[in-house]
């Protein structure tokens, strides 16, 4: 049986509505048509699946039937090449195994001090601002912080001097990539101003990563980090090392994914704390009771349940990875509906996390829903901010560590406030960023 869904335009289907507000298209379609919804993009059918058992089927139980070659796959490959995010099959598995030790729990724990130091340095910068009454773009600040920590821990490199340039290039390629997914005409190799900016930003990012690689070779050092693991890897059959192109793709993928998802998660968390000052007060009370004014360490995180719950709830309401696409490589049946070979599947943490039949008062910010004595089942795919199955985000534990230590370090010293008259709305590009940044007023406590 064919799945129900909005009819849209005769030729374009829902393209026009999607380009205007994809989040509204997805949430409204789920509410109106149920668990399996057919969305027509011109001649292409995409099936929105939002029921936990269906999501598990796609990501875990029958994941081999579903590939990565979706509408956006070719556009993403321009940015990430053949890195972990876009690679498939045996090549992907081989690269994943090479990179996995860099995210071992012991390495993550050892990185905690760098996260705390970076947050303390950022706090010092805020205290020295010449105009402390002016708003701070918290989205840009969180990107700068996460860039520093990811660079130091995974690449043993200091990126602070080039952080602004990297941030500009990242913003450009993410928005341009999303624009090309939404409008295939933009991907034509024409000498437009947008294409020139896009090409220049891609070049800038490649040069940054090539600089990391060249510096490592010049130094002759082999620190136990991700870059050393990738540079030291050898093909099992030929014994050959990775080419510079493959190294750039792998490093760029993990570097960009790490800073983008973590900084976005932190941005939305500060926004929610600004909207809910009573929760911020509860958090500072927990931090004072457990840390006694001492710097937060990785070992302290297990004693800070409210801190973890706040971040989990932020990831529920505003998951940085708001959509996950898969190609249907073999016909399958889900929820009584046939998914034809050659069609696509769309999973949306944003939509599933807001289903009223799965979450009590789903639109309300309520960190206590994740308290240990509450009944949220984090294993049933009603909650999946990092995806799931074999392609679960490789850096999810690292991202959570960095985000929690950042919050634990900064929250006792700042009280974020929204800027009057400035609406904050989600911008569903490659990730779910605050549109136009996140200006906040920061009320700093005395030293």
Image (spheres, grey):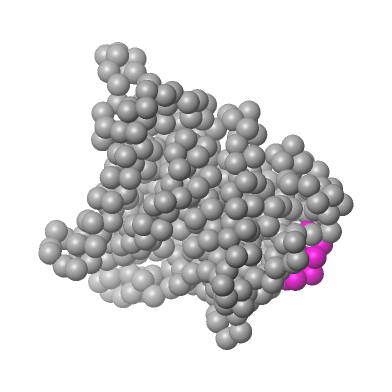
Could you tell me which residue is drawn at 43 percent across and 23 percent down? 222
Indicate the position of residue 158 as horizontal and vertical percent values.
Answer: 45, 43
Indicate the position of residue 421 as horizontal and vertical percent values.
Answer: 57, 86
The reply to whether the magenta stretch includes residue 280 is yes
Out of 211 and 241, give the one closest to the viewer. Answer: 211
Indicate the position of residue 392 as horizontal and vertical percent values.
Answer: 52, 39
Could you tell me which residue is drawn at 46 percent across and 58 percent down? 431
Snapshot quadrant of residue 439: bottom right
Relative horizontal placement of residue 86, taking residue 410 as reference (left or right): left
The reply to whether the magenta stretch includes residue 396 is no
Report the span colored magenta: 276-283
Relative horizontal placement of residue 77, taking residue 419 as reference (left or right): left
Out of 103 and 236, give the one closest to the viewer. Answer: 103
> Where is the C terminus found, in terms of image quarters?
bottom right
Indicate the position of residue 364 as horizontal and vertical percent values.
Answer: 70, 69
Figure check: 98 above or below 166: above
**Secondary structure mostly taken by the magenta-highlighted segment of the chain:** helix
């Amino acid at each position: 049986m064919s799945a129900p869904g909005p009819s849209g335009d005769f030729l374009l289907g829902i393209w026009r509505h999607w380009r205007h507000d994809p989040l509204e298209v997805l949430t409204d379609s789920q509410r109106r048509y149920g668990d399996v919804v057919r969305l027509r993009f011109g001649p292409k059918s995409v099936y929105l699946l939002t029921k936990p058992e269906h999501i598990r089927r796609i990501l875990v139980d029958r994941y081999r039937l579903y590939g990565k070659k979706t509408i956006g796959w070719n556009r993403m490959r321009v940015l990430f090449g053949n890195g972990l995010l876009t690679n498939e099959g045996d090549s992907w598995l081989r690269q994943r195994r090479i990179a996995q030790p860099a995210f071992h729990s012991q390495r993550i724990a050892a990185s905690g001090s760098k996260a705390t130091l970076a947050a303390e340095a950022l706090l010092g910068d805020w205290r020295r601002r010449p105009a402390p009454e002016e708003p701070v773009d918290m989205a840009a600040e969180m990107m700068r912080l996460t860039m520093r920590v990811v660079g130091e821990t995974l690449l043993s490199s200091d990126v602070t001097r080039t952080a602004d340039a990297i941030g500009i290039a990242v913003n450009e390629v993410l928005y341009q990539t999303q624009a090309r997914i939404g409008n295939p005409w933009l991907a034509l190799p024409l000498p437009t101003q947008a294409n020139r900016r896009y090409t220049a930003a891609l070049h800038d990012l490649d040069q940054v990563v090539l600089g990391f690689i060249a510096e490592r070779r010049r130094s002759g050092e082999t620190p136990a980090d991700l870059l050393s693991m990738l540079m030291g890897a050898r093909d099992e059959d030929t014994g050959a090392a990775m080419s510079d192109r493959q190294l750039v793709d792998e490093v760029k993928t993990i570097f960009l994914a790490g800073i983008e998802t973590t900084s976005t998660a932190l941005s939305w968390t500060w926004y929610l704390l600004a909207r809910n000052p009573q929760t911020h007060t509860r958090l500072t009370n927990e931090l004072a009771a457990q840390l006694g004014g001492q710097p937060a360490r990785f070992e302290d995180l297990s004693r800070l349940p409210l801190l973890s719950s706040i971040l989990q709830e932020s990831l529920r309401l505003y998951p940085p990875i708001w959509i996950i696409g898969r190609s249907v490589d073999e016909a399958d049946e889900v929820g009584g509906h046939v998914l034809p070979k050659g069609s696509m599947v769309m999973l949306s943490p944003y939509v599933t996390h807001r289903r009223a039949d799965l979450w009590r008062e789903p639109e309300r910010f309520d960190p206590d829903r994740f308290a240990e004595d509450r009944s949220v089942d984090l294993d049933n795919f009603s909650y999946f901010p990092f995806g799931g199955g074999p392609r679960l985000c490789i850096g999810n534990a690292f991202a959570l560590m960095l985000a929690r230590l950042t919050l634990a370090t900064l929250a006792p010293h700042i009280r974020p406030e929204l800027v009057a008259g400035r609406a904050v709305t989600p911008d569903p590009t490659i990730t779910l960023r605050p549109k136009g940044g996140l200006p906040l007023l920061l009320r700093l406590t005395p030293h």
